[in-house]
Image: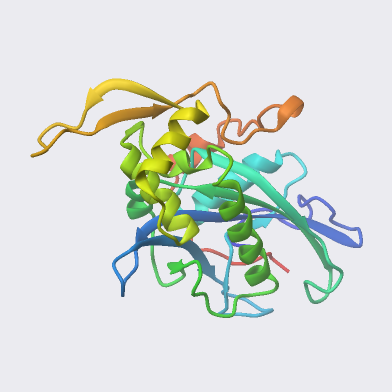
Amino acid sequence: MAGSDATPERAAGAGNDAALAVSTVIFALRPHETTGRMTLWIPLVRRTRNPQKDLWALPGGWLPVDEELVSAAARTLGETTGLAPTYLEQLYTFGELERSPGRRVVSVVYWAMVQSAEAERASESENVRWFVADELPRLAFDHNRIIDYALWRLRTKVEYAAIAHAFLGATFTLAELREVHEAVLQRHIDPANFRRTVEASGTVVATGEVVAGTRHRPPRLYRYDASIDLADRGPLGPESVAGAEAAGRTSTPSVPHTGEQR
């Protein structure tokens, strides 16, 4: 994981046999540099210290004892990349014994989706860079495995949940929504079948407006049904970021310590 100001004394698990950390996998849709097709990209940070110095890693850091998990994920994400995603969901907990040299580290991993416009505003530097999610180099620790799992979850979930809307603006056409599904799933989707499926799902609402300035029949605009939670946690309810989103939007990205501070 990447930059965190947490000291070992404030980190959960300090003084014990295991330490607790948070990491975040962030997906955005951007054109592929070679094919020009929309594809999934993720930001990574370069580790600036040993172990595994100079390898790329997921943004994240130690979890302080006085901070909620989701708030820590949002904060470290804002500190390293400047991103403040509207969709943030707990992905999985990785705690294999041999995943980190020395002290045992258990990582609670979140995943997020950001719109293309927000991804363009994200900070990029010598130590923060965007990569095509399916074309990654060797990463630090088990972060390749974590991203592989996140990709599998995204591609599985996009077919039955409303998660694709996290990549879009407040209003969108069905063609734009279909393009998101095609980019995530990496395959063509029949437009007519897609329209019928989406309209029957109850997850989108027609705004009554159309796209202006088109030469042919203007496509209708839709919005996502806000009563449906993108991160459905059932009776647990949504996690509260408690102001971390606002902090992420206004914070100046720090030089990442990169990777779980082991």
Q: Residue at x 43, y 35 (%)?
A: 196
Horizontal side of 34 relative to 235 (left or right) equals left
Residue 164 vs 104, above or below: the answer is: above
Residue 253 visible in the displayed image = no
In percent of width and height, residue 138 lies at 59, 80
Q: 182 or 103, which is in the foreground?
A: 182
In percent of width and height, residue 222 lies at 34, 28
Q: Residue at x 61, y 36 (%)?
A: 231
Label count reads: 0
Q: 162 or 252, which is in the foreground?
A: 162
Residue occupying the far right of the picture: 17
Horizontal side of 210 relative to 182 (left or right) equals left
In percent of width and height, residue 248 lies at 48, 43
How are the colours assigned in the image?
A: rainbow
Residue 188 vs 135, above or below: the answer is: above
* Image quadrant in which the N terminus is located: bottom right
Residue 218 visible in the displayed image = yes
Q: 65 or 37, which is in the foreground?
A: 37
Residue 90 location, quadrant: top right
Residue 13 location, quadrant: bottom right
Q: 137 or 232, which is in the foreground?
A: 232
Residue 107 vs 241, above or below: the answer is: below
* Image quadrant in which the C terminus is located: bottom right
